[in-house]
Image: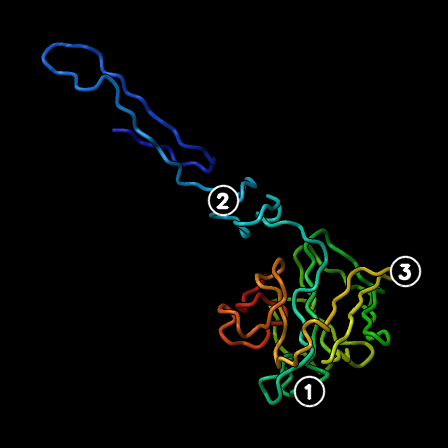
Amino acid sequence: TITGIQDDNIEGIETLKFTLGVGDNYLILSEAVEVTLLDDDSDTDGDGVLDAVDECPNIVGEPSNFGCPFLGFLINEVLYDPQSGTLGDANGDGTRDANEDEFIEFFNSGEAIDITGYTISDSSQIRHTFPSGSIIPVNGVLVLFGGGTPTGTFGGAMVQTASGGLLNLSNSGDLITLMDASGNTVLTFDIEPLSNNPNESYTRNPDLTGEFVQHAGIESANSRLFSPGTKIDGTSF
């Protein structure tokens, strides 16, 4: 009987070799028997984090970030064309509004970042200035709505509304620019390649690392048109 000891070490294939010596009263058919042991732990992407606890098992990441890479500050989802009727009520305040229900979802994959004084502009003017205390923690989410009274938990995300009264994201093409307090461009998002009036959001698929695609057509979205503050499937980041 051979009993293995369970551990969390990632080990390669191990071979046990048993050698039989010559003796009386038995016939040796083979002088050696080999037993191959396969480890039940795996690390598909080789980043040192077991698949069982790796939140990004197919992408090389950081052990300190649950096996996911630090991606910096990014836009994960944008809704520039809310569906008409109650289905387009993205901010959850009970009223669908073409401007108020627009939103941009930001994700911070890195050290906590203070974006106080940062601005969001479209192609024509500044639409939002982030107020004092806008500190997004590691793996934190901030959702910026065009307006209204956002109602809901939004996966625990920070929620703000545009200080200028609206985001004014043009369906025919627009350029969203995030600038720091000194006026340096931090990131941009070009709506023009996605300007097909989809009546739903565009989101990265998979979340954070994928290309932007229409939300409702993703299997895990379960036909939902958007997911401000959460992953595509509605769970928290």
Please give the label number shown on residue 44: 2
Name which residue type carries label 2: Thr
Name which residue type carries label 3: Ser
- Residue under the image location 73 percent in, 80 percent down: 172
Of pointers 2 and 1, the one earlier in the residue sequence: 2
Residue position marked by numbered label 1 in the rendering: 97
Name which residue type carries label 1: Asp
Dots 2, 1 in contact, CB < 8 A:
no
Q: Is residue 121 left or right of residue 23?
A: right
Of pointers 1 and 3, the one earlier in the residue sequence: 1
Dots 2, 3 in contact, CB < 8 A:
no
User: Label 2 vs label 3: CA separation?
Assistant: 42 Å
Q: Where is 134 relative to 122, above or below?
A: above
The outermost residue toward the right is 182
Q: Is residue 149 left or right of residue 59?
A: right
User: Label 2 vs label 1: CA separation?
Assistant: 45 Å
Look at the image and tell me in which quarter the N terminus lies: top left
- Residue under the image location 54 percent in, 66 percent down: 235
Please give the label number shown on residue 86: none
Quadrant in the rendering for residue 149: bottom right
Q: Number of callouts in the render?
A: 3
Look at the image and tell me in which quarter the C terminus lies: bottom right
User: What x and y, as percent, mark residue 88?
Assistant: 61, 84
Q: Residues within 10 Å of mark 2 (few under 14, many from 20)?
A: some
Quadrant in the rendering for residue 2: top left
User: Label 1 vs label 3: CA separation?
Assistant: 33 Å
Residue position marked by numbered label 3 in the rendering: 182
Q: Residues within 10 Å of mark 1 (few under 14, many from 20)?
A: many
Dots 1, 3 in contact, CB < 8 A:
no
Quadrant in the rendering for residue 79: bottom right
